[in-house]
Image (tube, rainbow, N blue to C red):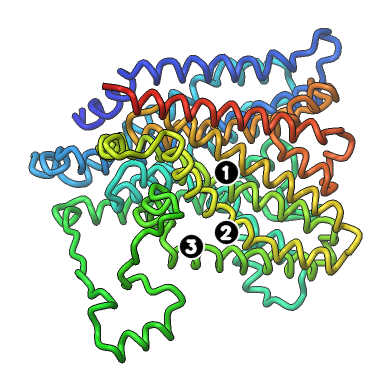
Amino acid sequence: MNPVIRREFIGILRSPKTFGMLLVLTALFSATVILQWPSDTSSVSGSKSLEVFRIFGYGLLAGVIFLVPAFPATSIVNEKNSKTLALLLNSPLSGPAIYLGKISGVLLFSLLVLLCSLPASAACFAMGGISLFEELGLLYLILFFMILQYSTMAMLISSHVQTSDAAVRITYTAVFGFLLITLIPAAFLRGTTFFPPTLLSAAEWLRCLSPLPAIMEVLGDGDVGSSGLQQASTTSRFLSLTFCTSLFFAGLTLSRLNYRIFDRSKSKGVITNDRELSKRLLRRLLYVVDPQRRKTGIPWFLNPVMVKEFRCRRFGRSQWLLRLIAACSIISMLLTFLATTSAESWGVATIGPLLVLMQVILVVVLTPSLASGLISGERDSGGWEILRMTPLSTFRVVTGKLLSVVWTLLLVLMATLPGYVMTVLIKPDLAPQIQMVLVCLFWITLQALAISAAVGSLFRYTAVSTSVTYVTVIACFLTPMLVWLAREAPFGHGTVEAALLLNPVGAALNVIGAAGFENYQLLPAAWWISGIVSAAMFALLSIQVWRLNRAV
């Protein structure tokens, strides 16, 4: 047996957290089915069993997306940072054997996650109306191929980055890209007539990289974004594309699994201030923000911790912020333009919900990556002891770190506002609704920031804090949506409304008139609850920082 497989798989199983996580997953999957189990056996029908199967399938998909990517994302970079990767490369094992051992350990753990759902899936099958191979078996096949794709992609990312927290952040961002962003081109291009057929066909194939269309097809919900049109089977396309991309990712990782993986050749560069006057003037004309220009001192009125975070964090640097803002602005305008030109399949009222969802996804992906390591990153790198020796108070440290994230998020979210401006110009009646949506968006961002900063401060290592923060934030924002999917089966109107009050996402979709959210009264209660949760999380963050600041 490959020794790397035993080392990876048994190493994961030895963690008490892994056992607790598998136990919780088994209980959650079982509870998903039990809550929807009919009290009267005479009420069991094909439609009822299909409703139970849908909720179970979406819950299983969410569980896999939450838990699986974090393990392969840190597999290679942890070996490299702990100096054990060089020992592995010097061992009799070849590069393919090392890779096979590592990916097999991750896949075996992923199979355990799927096995935790077998009692719930057996209950779904016992209700009847579900095919063992064409629905239940195909669901597990799609999930396994998705796990294979995400695991190989995460290991490729792990072979390129230098820190485990960066690997986790980039991996979850890539996962969301494959899951949701690949759906956007086909959704907006469908119904247009001025794009060439080859582009439309490419967008249809790109859409099949996401597991959502295939999962919805198996669960009987149709195809996401199909708009009632008859489409070719997305399941076969998804399986073939996923297998090919997995082989591609594995091949790229194998090409790096040698001694060259330790090479980090990089030009030392030249500071702009040390160049000739003519070159300094030319760079001043060419660059809005010159990344090679020496920074000035910190003014007395600025929080030094905030400035330190901006200058040390890659996306805090001005040139990266400008690139991110420009990309968000272009995407926002493009989405609005494509939505308004797709008159055959989209109406003007559809633009608002799409923009809201885009911004929520942006907040959920970006906020944990920025805020989870505010405290744990300092503790992990040893910088916290330096902060403790400064005369800065706990309040100044906390506010400085939070402001560095707040400004970044505000700039990025403001860059998505042109889409709302175009929506108002197209349909002025939506102006009051969009104003309330912007208030909801403020509370969404604040709540995500508070949860990310508070949860991340509870852990010593950055990679752990980033992983747990992503899972926590995604669970907080996705769980009410899963309850909403189960509305009237089994959750009643009051239960769904109470779940949607847990975060302002439902309120924003309710205000903008998204389908399925019209009949709930969520404002202003959702704002009050979001404010209370945010205040509690900020208080937890302050207490944790105060405790760490006083620790001996």
Farthest residue, direction top: 40
Residue 431 location in percent, x, y?
85, 58
Q: Earlier in the sequence, mark 3 or mark 1?
A: 3
Q: Are marks 3 and 2 in contact (CB under 8 Å)?
A: yes
Distance from Cα at disc 3 to Cα at disc 2? 8 Å
Distance from Cα at disc 2 to Cα at disc 1? 16 Å
Who's the residue at 43% across and 86% down the image? Answer: 285
In which quarter of the view is residue 217 placed? top right
Quick one: 159 or 103, which is closer to the camera? 159
Residue type at mark 1?
Val
Q: Residues within 10 Å of mark 3 (few under 14, many from 20)?
A: some
Q: Is 462 left or right of 469, judged from the image as shown? A: left
Farthest residue, direction front: 300
Secondary element at image label 1:
helix
Quick one: 231 or 434, which is closer to the camera? 434
Task: Quickly name the residue at label 3.
Answer: 321
Task: Quickly name the residue at label 1.
Answer: 364
Quick one: 503 or 95, which is closer to the camera? 503
Q: Which mark is residue 411?
A: 2
Secondary element at image label 2:
helix
Farthest residue, direction right: 429
Residue 273 location in percent, x, y?
27, 77
Residue type at mark 2?
Leu
